[in-house]
Image (tube, rainbow, N blue to C red):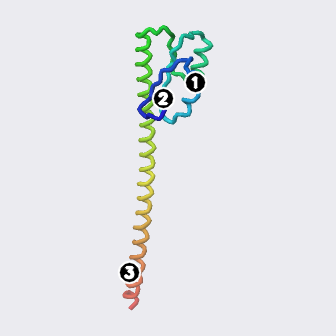
Amino acid sequence: MEDPSIGIIVTDINMPIMDGLTFLNELKAVQRPTRAIVASAYGDMGNIRTAMNRGAYDFVTKPIDFSDLETTLQKTINDLQLLIEGIQAKENLNQAVEEKEVALQSAAFKQQFLANMSHEIRTPLNAVGYDQSSA
């Protein structure tokens, strides 16, 4: 799963190297949004429940009804798109919060600088004004 463009995986329970249920466990380690659909001849509730508990988004049985598969794929695409948009919105919000904090800190530094400069400018002038009025 090194290709970042892969977001939807269709797998079977029976596969030659690794069974689909083990693959679903491995898929949990992927650090990007993905959705897995299990397509299998095993349509019993035990396999369906196990697949769903291991992270399958949906389950289609063989022989595959292609209108069901199309509906399932469309639903999965829509859900994955919403998930990606939500992640992007969260990242944008976090960035905006960070930028706001930087701006507030910058404004506080500016305010403190102006207060210090005002004090430094007034102090010598007060001394000059005091000397002139006492003379």
Q: Quadrant of residue 106?
A: bottom left
x and y, in percent, of residue 48 in the image: 58, 15
Q: Nearer the viewer, mark 1 or mark 3?
A: 1
Q: Position of residue 97 (x, y in %)?
A: 45, 46
Report the amino acid beneath label 1: Met
Q: CA distance from mark 1 to mark 3?
A: 83 Å
Q: Quadrant of the C terminus?
A: bottom left
* Residue found at x 51% / y 36%: 31
Disc 1 residue crowd, few under 14, some 14–19, many 20+, Cα 10 Å = few
Residue located beneath label 2 in the image: 34
- Give amino acid for label 2: Thr
- Point out the residue furthest to the front here: 16
Which residue carries the number 1 mark? 18
Q: Secondary structure at mark 2?
A: loop
Three-letter amino acid code at the position of disc 3? Leu
- Residue contact at pointers 1 and 2, CB within 8 angstroms: no
Residue 128 % position (x, y): 38, 85
Outermost residue toward the bottom in this view: 135
**Quarter assignment of residue 41:** top right
Name the residue: 51% across, 21% down: 57
> Who's the residue at 45% across and 30% down the image?
83
- Asked if residue 45 lies left or right of residue 120, the reply is right
Quarter location, residue 73: top left
- In the image, residue 122 above or below residue 115: below
